[in-house]
Image (cartoon, rainbow, N blue to C red):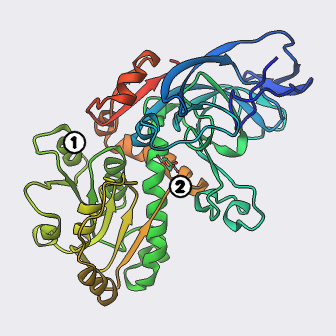
Amino acid sequence: MRIASSDAGAGAAVTPPSRVAIRLGHAGQCFLRTRPGIERRMKSVAVFPRTRELRIINEPEPVIQSPTQLLLRILDVGICGTDREICAFEYGTPPQGAAHLVIGHESLAEVVAAGDAVETLRAGDLVIPMVRRPCTHDHCAACRAGRQDFCSTGDFRERGIKEAHGFMTEMVVEEERYLHRIPRTLRDVGVLVEPLTIAQKALIQLWDIQERLPWTCPHRSGRRHGHCRRAVVLGAGPVGLLGAMALRANDFETIVYSRDRAPHPKEELTRAIGASYVCSEDVAPADLAAHVGDIDVVYEAAGASAIAFEMMHALGANSVFVFTGVPGRRGPVQVDTDALMRNLVLRNQVVFGTVNAGHDAFEAAVRELEGFVARWPQAVSSLISASHPLENHRELLLGRPGGIKHVLRMAA
Ligand code: BGC
């Protein structure tokens, strides 16, 4: 019998443990699960980099192998630029020894069964799996501290992206420590938690940086915002719009800067959350400050380096520029490095990049998403342009479907 290991997914054939105690159902009863000879199969979306194929594979369902693991049914999987790059074979690595990688990293799942040592989750709970798993090097202080989002060796694994199978499948097995519970009220939009963690990790770091301005630091007195006043979001994709919501929720005057000309659903959504919208064809990036006033924060979410560096010229004093996009390599662009460096020094500016997220950002994202739904229910649901059956995966992953966030609904 082939059993999937938790992190490597359904690729590895290992000997199943003969007796693993798990709890099933709300009653929480315990029994031994052996299932000899029973093999349930499931569909997954996988890429085969060597043969450059994208296809549905049919493999055995994974089985819990240790008491700290849970069996999850995947409900929704979001599709993002990273998935499309993996399907274009520009990114992504299968698990060691496997020819394929099951893709998908933005997910929402339901607990089907929990191992006996699982403490905080039970069958029926809705959970968001984290994406990154630590490297194994003793000298990586970040991974050893449980902060693999800051891994210093680069030998981390990411489910659905790098050396570990992902969530575009029917069932997965996962360790309790990589799961975050969400309330049932977030069933329809919970798949947005993972992309929202990017903004939350950025904000956590922004607050820490702006501690350097103690006179504008109200969260010393209990409020965790108010250091900066005006933020520009570069890009109106899901990461940009979720970032704009997070900035608005933290009382920033927020301007979304995008190439899509209004009227446009993205502009409507921006206005619905109390932010304003500027089209890049109307105002050049370097002129934006003259148009909207001093800019305290730029949250870059477009992955386009030329426009981002142009925008850097518009940064105000004591400001922060956050990069979240991963650009393709389109060749060199001209940048006025003297002007940028002068501003960085003479205006105390900070530029940082941020990737992936830790537990603190996941917890904040769940909390914030609940707040967004209460405040802007319509805008939050309009972030999800459509939910599709698995059969639509090719057009979503290989085409340009338009809209904002497309989701594969794996189970109701
Ligand atoms: C994911 C992150 C991941 C990054 C780099 C993003 O699309 O949301 O979790 O760390 O890609 O692979």
Instruction: Residue lying at the far front in this picture: please name it.
Output: 51
Location of mark 2 (residue): 361
377 shown above or below 239:
above
What residue is shown with label 1? 266
Label 1: how many Cα within 10 Å (few below 14, some 14–19, many 20+)? many
Residue kind at label 1, given as amino acid type = Lys
Residue 387, relative to residue 250: is it above or below?
Answer: above
Quarter location, residue 348: bottom left
Residue closest to the eye, 339 or 110: 339
Crowdedness near tag 2: few (<14), some (14–19) or many (≥20) residues, C-alpha within 10 Å: many
* Outermost residue toward the top in this view: 37
Q: Label 2's element?
A: helix
Q: Which quadrant is the N terminus positioned in? A: top right
Q: Residue at x 64, y 60 (%)?
A: 147
Residue 78, image quadrant = top left
Q: Quadrant of residue 336?
A: bottom left
Q: Residue at x 30, y 45 (%)?
A: 237
Establish whether ligand 1 lies closer than 8 Å to the Cβ of label 1.
no
The amino acid marked with disc number 2 is: Ala
